[in-house]
Amino acid sequence: MNPPRSETLPLRSDEDLVRVRQAVRAWMVEQNFNLVEQTKMVTAASELGRNALVYGGGGSARLESPVDGGHGGIRVTFEDHGPGIADIAQALSNGFSTGGGLGLGLGGAKRLVKDFEIFSEPGQGTRVIITIRK
Amino acid sequence: MERIPILLVGEFLLVSIQVDLHDRLALALQDDLTTEVVKVRAKGVLIDISSLEIVDSFIGRVLGNIAALTAMLGANAVVVGMRPAVAITIVELGLDLSCLRTAINVDQGMAMLRLLLRPVASQGSDESAEK
Amino acid sequence: MPTNNPSRIAEILARHQQAILEDWLLAQLAAFSARHNLISEADLRRQSADFIGIFGTACQAGTLTDIATPAWQPVRDFLASISRSRASQGFSPSETATFVFSLKQPLFAHIRQELAANAESLADEMWTATVLIDKLGLYTTELFQTAREEVIKRQQMEMLELSTPVVKLWDGILAVPLIGTLDSARTQVVMESLLQSIVDTGSNIAIVDITGVPTVDTLIAQNLLKTAAAARLMGAQCIICGIRPQIAQTMVHLGVAFGEVVTRATLADALAFAFREIGCTVSRQAPRN
């Protein structure tokens, strides 16, 4: 059984985003998640990390394991102090984008990782939590 | 700044992405490739992504842009070697990359580029011969 | 109870080891009379002798009331290996537990013999021995159960893999005949093994034959479409065939559109299409007279 641990990484540059992806990958490999699960989780982390970086003006990503007192699993929390989101339902819908992207960031990440929580209010920043259980 | 090397093979440009692609690097590749297509008057661009562990919406968009830009400049682009896990993830993500020409590996990608270069007349006669 | 008055079980066991072993073997052979085909008498004797030795050492070294302590580690390991081997040899759980429980009778007999004069300590020691052997017996049963579950899990995985053979029909053409119900776990295995085979063989056409799939609901249809989309991204074309008329009707009724994915009624039609795609022609030789 793994001792509980956590790691907080900054999200201030493109290179930081790569480091967050690599950390999520390393944790997934360590817990023997299969290749597809790894790829989905890392891709979701990449989308959410980029959101925090581009729309939130930078923030952080925090990795934790195990989750809910279980034997394993990984939880990643993305946090920024940007403008926040007024209409979360709209932000999750496909094709919605304020940043000129494809608008897949939030909705796409949610499709990749079923366990997805989002907390945001205008002016309060945004926090998104994705969890994968063992 | 680090850059992804672009090789000229015959009349085609070959790019193999071997590093963890960050966003600025992906945009730099898009610029470099379009510049290079014009400079060497390349007829085709082959992008090998077999080492790429993820393609998220940003990298996907850059690949789509490269295809559209090279088409505008009179060249064809083929993306080769996408890993199964990456392909499954793109489908789940909902990313539409149907504009991309794809092939299993570099060999087949090269064959595809050569086939696309054949004069239209001979292509037509081939098709009628098959049917 | 036995804490202030150290248990004599270890001592009794050490002194009468050989006699207890013989009695125990007789008890086991009686219980297993019908199971001579599963384990030989020589093996049983060797296992029993080994166990008595390890058991005696643990009794001397550790407390008799807690088998989770380090002193009992060798005993636990030994029982684990017994449980595993018996699970795979085809013993039932109760037969496996009998290995430990049948030790009670000979052990009790010797305790009674030794302590006949002292009724109080006899009762104490009997109680200690009962609790101890019950614990070991239950531990064995639990392990047996775990071992069986592992076997079942492994077999399920093997079946999953067996049920999705990806075959090469021609240079550049793969096929996967799906048989039976497609749940989402199985569809995922099919999808992944098909896509991996595409890479491994460098094939650019993959035929998915669903002739053997009894029903196709919206979810399965979606999964098939996703597989086709993923294959396309990798540079391969997916052909779905074996769509029976009822299934075609259901799909139209459900509003499932296969869109750009090529579909054919039979595997033969799909293969003909695939040959045309890769530029192969099949011709019949002129009949010989």
Image (tube, rainbow, N blue to C red):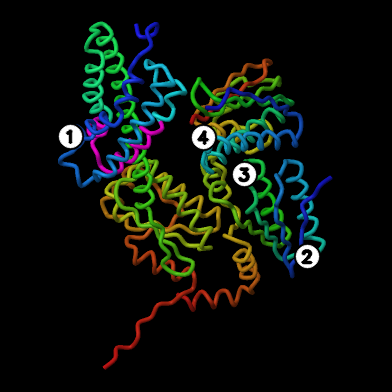
Q: Judge depth for marks 2 and 4 and give the one in front.
A: 4
Mark 3 or 4: in front is 3
Q: Please state the chain letter of the residue tagged with numbered disc 4 in the rendered image.
A: A
Kind of residue at badge 2: Arg
**In the image, what residue occupies the spot 66% across and 31% down?**
A49
Q: Give a yes or no on whether discs 1 and 2 share a subunit.
A: no
Q: Can residue C149 be seen in this view?
A: no
SS for tag 3? loop
Residue B105 appears in the figure = yes
Q: In this view, does B119 lie to the left or right of B12?
A: left
Upstream in sequence: badge 3 or badge 2: 2
Q: Which mark is on residue A111?
A: 4
Q: Which of marks 1 and 2 is in front?
A: 1
- Element type where label 1 sits in the image: helix
Give the residue pinned by disc 3: B54
Q: Which amino acid does label 4 sit on?
A: Arg
- Chain for disc number 1: C
Q: What stretch is highlighted in magenta?
A: C77-99
On what subunit does the disc labeled 2 rest? B
Q: Mark 2 points at which residue?
A: B41
Which mark identifies residue C31? 1
| Residue drawn 30% across the image and 35% down it | C48
Q: How far apart are marks 3 and 4 (CA)?
A: 16 Å
**Given the image, on which type of amino acid does mark 3 rest?**
Ile
Q: Do labels 1 and 4 share a chain?
A: no
